[in-house]
Image: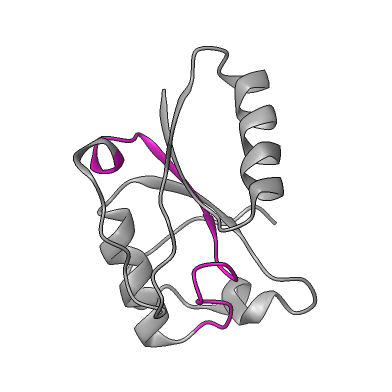
Amino acid sequence: MRILIAAPSHQTVTAVEIVARAIWPGATFVLLPRNARASVPQQSIAAVQCDLCVLDMLGLGWSRWSIENEEQLNILLAGRSAILLLPPGNSGNWPDADGSVNQWGRIA
């Protein structure tokens, strides 16, 4: 299992790695640094080859749902499965998104 982690804080990366290794002991990780802008970060070949993405939506600058942010999310995912780490509180309205750009599942 190859896991792409897009999270700017070392603490978040460490927490994701600990949880992922408990589930997938042989997992390898690729870190995706944040852009200065809230645009889709450039991905390396190793990043594109990951099976799962764990994305810190606040850290990517996509804390609030919008059509533009959802489109950028779908570009970044390119059809891959993802775990989205949402901001506290109302979660930036991501759980209420209708998936108009792409249907994505939720854990209720």
Q: Quadrant of the C terminus?
A: bottom right
Single out the residue that lies furthest toward the top: 26
60 relative position to 91: left or right: left
Let me know if residue 58 is in the magenta part: yes
Residue 21: quadrant of the picture: top right
- Residue 7 within the segment the image draws in magenta: no
Residue 37: which quarter of the image?
bottom left
The residue sitting at 37% across, 67% down in the picture is: 73
Instruction: Say which residue appears at 57% left-offset and 67% top-offset.
Output: 59
Tell me the quadrant of the picture where the N terminus can be found: top left
Report the magenta stretch's main SS.
Answer: loop
Residue 71 x %, y %:
31, 75
Residue, far left: 45
Q: Nearer the viewer, residue 37 or 104?
A: 37
Identify the residue at image location x=50%, y=76%: 62
Residue numbers of the magenta segment: 47-65
